[in-house]
Image (cartoon, grey):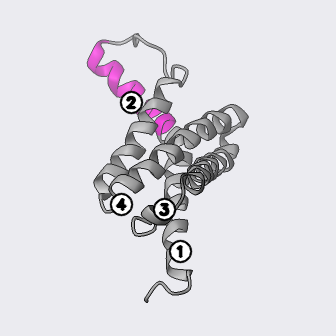
Amino acid sequence: MSQLAPSLSRQQLRLRSIAWSLGAGVAALLLGLPLGLEAALRAGGCGVLYGLLAFHLQRVDPDDGHLQAGLVGAVCGIHSLALPPLAPWPPPAPLPAGLVAVAPTVMMGLVRAWLPLIGAAVLLHGGQVLVRRLRPGNGS
């Protein structure tokens, strides 16, 4: 994509940006549906944000996988801020024992919340690689 960026018009870049946002949002929404409508809507909203940011990050530095992974982590963190409490706090037991008691519940709640976003990122970037390989005249 970085080789194509100089030849694309601003309008084409806007359309690609919107396509990435909608693609990631719809993918996250669909992957979140088994977890319930509210979870799917939250995941879809974060997916739209992720797609928009991922497109622009891809244009700036397409070869930095660490930045892409960090972006997924950042959007998952943003999504976590909007979650309702996953376990009662403060725990009724002393702090160390209370943390041990609530840790599995919290971790499973976060994993369930993050899976749709991680799946959307994998689909978005996997689709991009697939399109690049299937595009005629790509030299491979």
Where residue 96 sits in the image (x, y, percent)?
A: 27, 20
From the viewer's side, name the closer residue of 40 and 3. 3
Does label 2 or label 1 sit earlier along the sequence?
2
* The label number, if any, that marks residue 125 in the structure image: 3
Q: Is 105 left or right of 26, judged from the image as shown? A: left
Q: Amino acid at mark 3?
A: His
Q: In the rendered image, which quarter contains the N terminus?
A: bottom left
Between the C-alphas of marks 3 and 1, the distance is 9 Å
- Residue picked out by circle 4: 62
Q: Nearer the viewer, mark 1 or mark 4?
A: 4
- Residue picked out by circle 1: 130
Do the residues under discs 4 and 3 have CB atoms within 8 angstroms?
Answer: no
Q: In the rendered image, which quarter contains the C terminus?
A: bottom left
Does label 3 or label 1 sit earlier along the sequence?
3
What residue is rendered at 47% in x and 42% in y? 111
Magenta part of the chain: 94-110
Helix, strand or loop at mark 2: helix
Do the residues under discs 1 and 4 have CB atoms within 8 angstroms?
Answer: no
* The label number, if any, that marks residue 103 in the structure image: 2
Between the C-alphas of marks 2 and 4, the distance is 36 Å
Secondary structure character of the magenta stretch overall: helix
Q: Amino acid at mark 2?
A: Ala
Does label 1 or label 4 sit earlier along the sequence?
4
Crowding near pointer 2: few (<14 within 10 Å), some, many (20+)?
Answer: some
Whether residue 85 is situated above or below residue 113 in the rendered picture: above
Between the C-alphas of marks 4 and 3, the distance is 11 Å
Between the C-alphas of marks 1 and 4, the distance is 15 Å
Q: Nearer the viewer, mark 2 or mark 4?
A: 4
Crowding near pointer 4: few (<14 within 10 Å), some, many (20+)?
Answer: some
